[in-house]
Image (tube, rainbow, N blue to C red):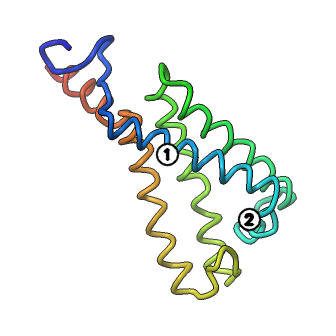
Amino acid sequence: MDQNGIAGNNQAGTSTFQKVGRVLLGLNLAFAGTSHLTWARTEFLAQVPPWLPLDGDLVVVLSGIVEITLGLALVFWFSQRFLVGWVVAAFFVAIFPGNIAQLVHHRDAFGLNSDLARTVRLFFQPVLVIWALWATGAWQTWRARKRTSWK
């Protein structure tokens, strides 16, 4: 660690708790991606916004592939965890309109069969963004770099 408490190469390290969180998030993403391609494919169609100019099934398949890729990257690509953290966080932001579309169009899926349930679910998307940034150390690394650039 340097004088600013930043581990090698000006990048903050992650705690064991963060590492476990990163692996759990990665495994969950890989699992969700697999479900996109198999047993939950129809359920995920409920989240594809109707204004998207692509075939809904194609969107489900492609997003499943992206989720599997990001999940595996979280688990295995430790050397690039900060970058992966930002990409995963951006992915969670990018798919948020699908969650909104499910609410606005009153589409039942994943047991979300009321507007209240679909609304409550919206509040969990920011949690996923924060989880990705925290578990990978991406946020603390960005803050540490910003702090050192101000000096």
- Secondary structure beneath dot 2 equals helix
Q: Position of residue 30 (x, y in %)?
A: 65, 45
Crowd band around label 1 with a 10 angstrom C-alpha radius: few (<14), some (14–19), many (20+): some
Q: Position of residue 107 (x, y in %)?
A: 70, 80
**Residue 29 higher or lower than 54, as above or below:** above
Crowd band around label 2 with a 10 angstrom C-alpha radius: few (<14), some (14–19), many (20+): many
Q: Tell whether 56 sits left or right of 25.
A: right
**Residue 130 higher or lower than 5, as above or below:** below
Residue, x 61% and y 56% (percent of image)? 95
Residue, x 56% and y 78% (percent of image)? 118
Tell which of 16 and 29 is nearer to you. Answer: 16
Q: Tell whether 108 sits left or right of 139.
A: right
Q: Position of residue 86 (x, y in %)?
A: 47, 37
- Secondary structure beneath dot 1 equals helix
Numbered disc in front, either 2 or 1: 1
What is the spatial separation of the Cα atoms under label 2 and label 1, in whole angstroms? 21 Å
Which is more N-terminal, label 1 or label 2? 1
Q: Examine the image and state in which quarter residue 8 appears.
A: top left
Type of the residue with mark 1? Leu
Type of the residue with mark 2? Phe
Residue bearing the label numbered 1: 24
Q: Position of residue 72 (x, y in %)?
A: 62, 34
Residue, x 32% and y 30% (percent of image)? 14
Residue bearing the label numbered 2: 44
